[in-house]
Image (cartoon, rainbow, N blue to C red):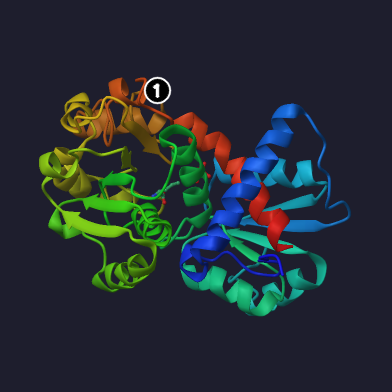
Amino acid sequence: MALSIRGRSLLGLKDFTEAEIRLMLDTAKHYKKLKQKGELHQYQKGKSIALLFEKTSTRTRCAFEVAAYDLGINAVFLGKDDIQLGKKESIEDTAKVLGRMFDGIEFRGFKQESVDALAKYSGVPVWNGLTDTYHPTQILADFLTIEEHVGKLKGVKLVYIGDGRNNMSNSLMVGSSKMGLHYVVVAPKELWPEESLIKMCRDFCKESGGTIEVTDDIDQAVKDADVLYTDVWASMGEEDKFAERIKLLKPYKVTMDVVKATGNPDVIFMHALPSFHDLNTAMGQEMKQKFGLNDMEVTDEVFLSKHSVVFDEAENRMHTIKAVIALTI
Ligand code: CP
Ligand code: NVA
């Protein structure tokens, strides 16, 4: 029987095998081709999905909405002030209601337990659109982008520089360990990933051939990197932590010197976005005023350089999310 993930939720990549993740990536490539050729693919007409957002979003929301439309699916957006979730009605009761009406539910919010509970009680596939712990749909887009630019996933050296305990680092570690990449986290010791996560991922590596390394030595770590990846220094909900993070992470900015230190002229730079790389935002202006910074995790020079594939990544959110929806509902 052909491999299938029909009926499954995507709460984190840890629940999927290498073959199942491969299926999602290959399906995304198929849909990307159809989209580029302008071939309609409304294969799931008559279905409806709910998009729950406790936190704000540009890419994830738009990717789910456009992907649903392309598949012929009706998508209903429910922002944090639109429904009772957890305030006047428990997540369990809300999940049971939504499960009676929708064929699938996307959730972006704070706690991983919330998205897990939605999956447990709704009876329909639930997709994690980012929690404080994981951001699995982002990793699918990142891996599709790496395959497009580097040509493979197995054996690729992916160096993540920055907050080593956040949702991006956690998910990149899980994804890398499932797909056989060499994943290196470069962060100050205060921001190293949890030991239990490293242990789980090293177990996955035994099957995939991947490796996990954690270090605070940026010069040594980036040597021979195929991919340099960074993320914001304070994630959504952590805005009060900027002062302490700036102190800790200032030596871990991705600059042209870091790019050169890889020794790889074809190294690619990746970022899930949004990114603080210039002063063209209200937040950028605030950081300039408070801390005298013109950028944070990456310089404008690197962000705009030929190494940067950040907008390919952003586009691939839509193709990969479409694959996940199509394969699961
Ligand atoms: N990368 C990402 O998740 O972007 P949004 O926060 O805009 O959805
Ligand atoms: N770590 C970031 C990722 C945004 C896509 C955040 O959670 O804000």
Q: Is residue 329 left or right of residue 280?
A: right
For ligand 1, tell me if the residue under mark 1 lies within 8 Å.
Answer: no
Q: Quadrant of the N terminus?
A: bottom right
Q: Tell me which corner region of the image, top left, top right, bottom left or bottom right, holds residue 125.
A: bottom right
Q: Residue placed farthest to the right in the image?
A: 46
Taking depth in this image into account, of 87 and 164 the one nearest to the observer is: 164
Secondary structure beneath label 1: loop
Question: Which residue is rendered at x = 68% and y = 62% of the image?
Answer: 105
Amino acid carrying mark 1 in the image? Asn
Taking depth in this image into account, of 210 and 325 the one nearest to the observer is: 210
Asked if 299 appears above or below 61 in the picture, the reply is: above
Taking depth in this image into account, of 209 and 46 the one nearest to the observer is: 209
Q: Position of residue 307 (x, y in %)?
A: 35, 25
Q: Position of residue 325 (x, y in %)?
A: 69, 55
Q: Residue placed farthest to the front in the image?
A: 1
Question: Which residue is rendered at x = 55% and y = 73% of the image?
Answer: 116
Check disc 1 and report the residue beneath it.
280
Q: Is residue 127 left or right of residue 203?
A: right
Label 1 crowd bin: few (<14), some (14–19), many (20+), radius 10 Å: few
Q: Position of residue 187 (x, y in %)?
A: 19, 51
Q: Position of residue 268 (x, y in %)?
A: 35, 32
Residue 80 appears in the picture as rendered = no
Q: Is residue 16 left or right of residue 172?
A: right
Question: Which residue is rendered at x = 42% and y = 60% of the image?
Answer: 132
